[in-house]
């Protein structure tokens, strides 16, 4: 029965979509809803993923983040040609198509190449650029890494899940391919001799070579065809398509892309040194790291105290529950817990919670398990005679805990709690994996936009060290004061 | 004042107290003696329910302490206890050790509590130690502070659990003197002790326990001079 209903539903949906499609097609020629909406609002909303210099990237001007790059220049031109205000909407690359289809953005200009899959979802304009892949090597190796055969048995770094990965696996004989999560990691691999070459798109590679003079293109060419880079727009918007193509024709005729590229590389390396350019990213990062860690340790301590009291409880089920909680959280990696909270809140609970909140929740829960054990050990370290004496004087359990046990236990608890705080600061770097903008995350952003894969890591390490070192000094000072009272 | 009826206590399968019946009158000083492991400390700890009896009743001033829902914390305020290991609160100065409980339980105004604490310290001969931390006291001094602390609650009965066992021999006398003074004032006292001299001299009644039962009890001169039971005789022959 269920099966029949399913089939029926699928049928209805299919027929429905066919109908709406044909309807749209008949109206489309004379009536472009999308274009009408854009004209009415006077604003062109351009979606892009600003992590792909020199095409689009974030740039700091007097502490303010602005967007720059080839695609931004193109977007400005399109807005100007059509007398529209430009609004850039930055999001994850894989969310762009969905955003376009649901009307959150009007067009995508994000270095997007056409693929058959994408063409099913959206329309593309004429290409404004053709891109191909190249091999990046160390400049002193360039002379003997000239041909595809020279790369036989060599170590090749690529970004995971990309065309470049496919090329490395299919075109190079017996290559030792390392697939990495982030583009800057592939560059770092070549720089640190962990890989002999990295495959990436030519414009991006050019940007890296400008910042890293020890790198160069190899003369190798690949068998693939050049890929067209186009603007994506919703289906059935003929007027919008026409307007976009007009601008692209002009851009291609006047070779404006070359100008944009020059502007982009200027934007990438202008004004001042590394510190002044990327300071704001790291300040943002350190603020978030401190925020996350403080909330983590404070809420973790409150929750942890509860769990510890549960575990010490004479009521057996409460004690068991607390044990299960503690053992599970201490026995599974924080990374897994972070992902479970992040995806679980949406997938299982249907809640739309920001990555920051998810990260904090995961850290609080994780810390509470460790802090519960710290509390329990601290309380257990106090002689049973203290409790017996207090109770024999007629104090209640709560009064005994508050006035007799905790003031003594805190001397054992505080140093361990301080260590947990230090651990938390370091482990908070894990929430960068779900996109929380703390130190590590911002270091990775700066890796991407500065084309310097190494310095941001050093700065991040320095910042973590300053935080943890300061904290442990403060803890030592407090401990010293407490010892003095003995 | 305290009446114990058919009291049994088991730790797991180990029967520590077997069917104990006894009564302690107001103003009476009762010494409990016997070999170690005979259950005397457990019996004492049952009197304020630090140990929960497996079976039987502990009736204090007409209230059955083993009854569920009884205001145990309030009744315990009337039962002072002194432990073998003193158990002073190390994070509090001597005077604050004494006033901690009455202050929390709002027994009297704070300045009255302070005065009372100083009086009690004078009584145990440690007035000059009011403002020091317990870690700076000797064992004998600690135990005298512990007695003062228990007295600050103005209890109706005092339980002593081997109060001199952890002390150096030369300071035992100081603690026993405080206890003798207390007995003279008419305090009801139950003392688990190995000090036969003290039991003989101060107590009104001596209870001899072995293997979780009361073997024999009576006035001190009767029990010490003419023990009826063979086990009592053996025990006394060894310790006297």
Image (tube, coloured by chain):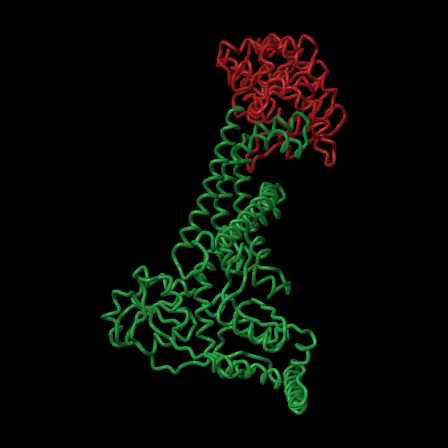
Which residue is more in the foreground, A151 or B200?
A151
Q: Residue furthest front?
A: A254
Residue A90 in view (yes/no): yes
Residue at the image point whose x is 38% and y is 65% from the top: A208
Instruction: Answer above or below: position of B79 versus A33.
Output: above
Where is residue A40 shown, x and y percent of the image?
70, 76
User: Eyeballing the image, is B55 above or below A41?
Assistant: above
B201 or A91, which is in the foreground? Answer: A91
Q: Colour of chain A?
A: green
Where residue A8 sits, quadrant-wise, is bottom right
Residue B17 pos. (x, y %):
60, 29
Instruction: Where is residue A94? Give x, y as percent.
Output: 53, 71
Residue A184, x across and y down, in percent: 41, 63
Would you say residue B40 is visible in this rendering? no
In the image: residue A431, left or right of residue B222: left
Above or below: residue A465 compared with residue A333? above
From the viewer's side, name the closer residue of A123 and B139. Answer: A123
The image quadrant where one finds the N terminus of chain A is bottom right
> Which chain gets the red colouring?
B
């Amino acid at each position: 029965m269920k099966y029949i209903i399913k089939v029926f539903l699928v049928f209805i949906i299919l027929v429905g979509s066919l109908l709406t499609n044909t309807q749209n097609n008949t109206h489309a020629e004379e009536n472009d809803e999308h274009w009408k909406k854009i004209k009415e609002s006077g604003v062109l909303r351009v979606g892009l993923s600003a992590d792909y210099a020199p095409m689009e990237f974030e740039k700091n001007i007097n502490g303010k983040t602005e967007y720059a790059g080839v695609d931004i220049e193109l977007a400005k031109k399109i807005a100007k040609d059509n007398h529209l205000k430009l609004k850039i909407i930055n999001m994850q690359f894989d969310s762009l198509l969905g955003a376009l289809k649901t009307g959150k953005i009007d067009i995508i200009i994000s270095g997007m190449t056409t693929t058959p899959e994408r063409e099913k979802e959206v329309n593309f304009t004429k290409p404004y650029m053709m891109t191909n892949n190249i091999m990046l090597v160390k400049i002193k190796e360039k002379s003997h890494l000239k041909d595809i055969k020279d790369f036989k048995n060599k170590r090749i770094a690529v970004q995971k899940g990309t065309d470049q990965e496919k090329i490395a696996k299919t075109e190079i004989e017996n290559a030792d391919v390392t697939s990495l999560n982030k583009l800057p990691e592939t560059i770092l691999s070549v720089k640190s001799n962990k890989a002999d070459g990295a495959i990436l798109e030519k414009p991006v590679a050019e940007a890296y070579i400008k910042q890293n003079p020890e790198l160069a293109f190899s003369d190798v060419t690949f068998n693939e065809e050049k890929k067209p880079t186009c603007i994506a727009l919703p289906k059935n918007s003929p007027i919008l398509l026409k307007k976009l193509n007009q601008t692209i024709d002009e851009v291609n005729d006047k070779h404006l892309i070359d100008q944009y590229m020059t502007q982009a590389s200027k934007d990438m390396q202008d004004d001042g040194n590394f510190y002044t350019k990327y300071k704001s990213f790291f300040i943002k990062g350190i603020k978030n790291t401190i925020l996350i860690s403080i909330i983590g340790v404070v809420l973790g301590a409150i929750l942890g105290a509860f769990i510890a009291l549960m575990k010490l409880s004479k009521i057996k089920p409460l004690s068991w529950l607390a044990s299960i909680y503690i053992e599970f959280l201490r026995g599974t990696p924080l990374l897994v817990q972070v992902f479970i909270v992040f995806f679980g809140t949406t997938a299982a609970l249907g809640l739309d919670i920001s990555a920051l909140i998810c990260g904090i929740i995961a850290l609080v829960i994780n810390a509470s398990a460790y802090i519960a054990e710290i509390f329990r050990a601290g309380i257990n370290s106090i002689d049973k005679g203290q409790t017996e004496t207090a109770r024999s004087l007629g104090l209640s359990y709560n009064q005994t805990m508050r006035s007799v046990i905790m003031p003594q236990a805190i001397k054992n608890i505080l140093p361990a709690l301080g260590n947990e705080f230090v651990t938390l600061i370091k482990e908070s770097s894990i929430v960068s994996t779900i996109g929380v903008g703390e130190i590590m995350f911002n270091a990775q952003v700066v890796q991407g936009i500065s084309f310097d894969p190494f310095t941001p890591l050093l700065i991040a390490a320095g910042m973590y060290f300053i935080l943890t070192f300061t904290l442990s000094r403060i803890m030592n000072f407090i401990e010293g004061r407490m010892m003095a009272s003995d | 004042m305290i009446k114990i009826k058919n009291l049994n206590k088991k730790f797991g399968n180990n029967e520590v107290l077997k069917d104990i019946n006894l009564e302690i009158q107001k103003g009476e000083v009762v010494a409990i003696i016997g070999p170690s492991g005979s259950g005397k400390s457990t019996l004492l700890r049952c009197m304020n329910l630090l140990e929960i009896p497996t079976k039987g009743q502990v009736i204090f001033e007409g209230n059955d302490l083993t009854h569920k829902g009884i205001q145990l914390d309030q009744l315990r305020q009337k039962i002072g206890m002194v432990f073998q290991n003193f158990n002073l609160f190390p994070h509090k100065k001597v005077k604050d050790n004494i006033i901690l409980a009455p202050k929390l339980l709002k027994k009297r105004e704070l300045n009255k509590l302070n005065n009372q604490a100083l009086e009690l310290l004078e009584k145990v001969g440690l007035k000059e130690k009011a403002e020091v931390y317990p870690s700076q006291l000797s064992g004998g001094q600690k135990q005298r502070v512990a007695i003062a602390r228990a007295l600050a609650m103005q209890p109706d009965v005092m339980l002593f659990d081997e109060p001199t066992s952890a002390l150096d021999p030369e300071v035992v006398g100081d603690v026993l003197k405080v206890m003798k003074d207390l007995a003279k004032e008419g305090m009801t006292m139950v003392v688990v002790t190995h000090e036969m001299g003290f039991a003989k001299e101060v107590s009104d009644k001596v209870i001899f326990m072995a293997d979780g039962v009361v073997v024999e009890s009576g006035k001190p001169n009767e029990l010490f001079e003419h023990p009826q039971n063979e086990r009592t005789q053996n025990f006394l022959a060894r310790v006297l």
